[in-house]
Amino acid sequence: MVTEIMKGLATTLKHAFQPRITIEYPEETRTVRPRFKGRHVLKRYENGLEKCIGCSLCAAACPADAIFVEASENTNAVRYSPGERYASVYEINMLRCIFCGYCEDACPTEAIVLEHDYELSYYDRESAIYVKDRLLVPSVEGSDITPMEVEKGEFDRAIPDMEDPS
């Protein structure tokens, strides 16, 4: 019986002096992998216009039905995005989101991006619904904030034009 106790104490002492593998979160944070999918962000162009054109392809691609997009028309006097439309309402329910990244893949303008931020905790359900103001990246220093008046022009597509195979 004494030998079993001594074996147990030896095992305990052996593990007590080994280096710790526990990370003291939040004092220490681990770096995430490059393909990690975290918090959603709506991007802007360099001139401050929103990349989202309100096409709702992200909402259609979402298997969890966590995204709601309502589009409105741009005017020449008030312009939010370079296209004809913009997303007047953009909401993501983070309680429903499964972080699959299908919304990111479906977006033709690369407006929605899943960043590496993983600190998503809430005290109530209302704060888990991210509205457009919370998702949109702040405007770059020196650029105008949307809405603004700009000349119509072309913007680069996120998906390259494909050649006709026939």
Image: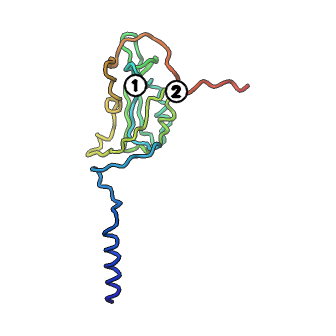
**Image spot of residue 76 (x, y percent):** 40, 10
Q: Classify residue 5 as left or right of residue 73.
A: left
Q: Which residue is mark 1?
A: 44
Please report the residue visible at 35 percent of the width from the left and 76 percent of the height from the top.
11
Within 10 Å of the Cα at label 1, are there few (<14), some (14-19), or many (20+) other Cα atoms? many
Which sits in the foreground, 42 or 73? Answer: 42
Residue for badge 2: 158
Position of residue 49 measured from the top left corner of the image (x, y, whole percent): 39, 20
Q: Tell me the amino acid under the disc marked 1.
A: Arg
Q: Is residue 146 above or below residue 59?
A: above
Q: Nearer the viewer, residue 68 or 43?
A: 43
Instruction: Decide which of 156, 146 is in the foreground and name it.
Output: 156
- Quadrant of the snapshot with the C terminus: top right
Nearest the camera: 33 or 53?
A: 33
Q: Distance between the Cα atoms at labels 2 and 1? A: 14 Å
Measured along the vertical axis of the image, is residue 2 above or below residue 22?
Answer: below
* Nearest to N terminus: mark 2 or mark 1: 1
Q: Where in the figure is residue 79, as x and y percent of width and height?
A: 38, 15
Residue 151 is situated, as x and y percent measured from the top left of the image, at 43, 10
Question: Against 78, is 118 above or below?
Answer: below
The answer to which image quadrant residue 36 occupies is top left
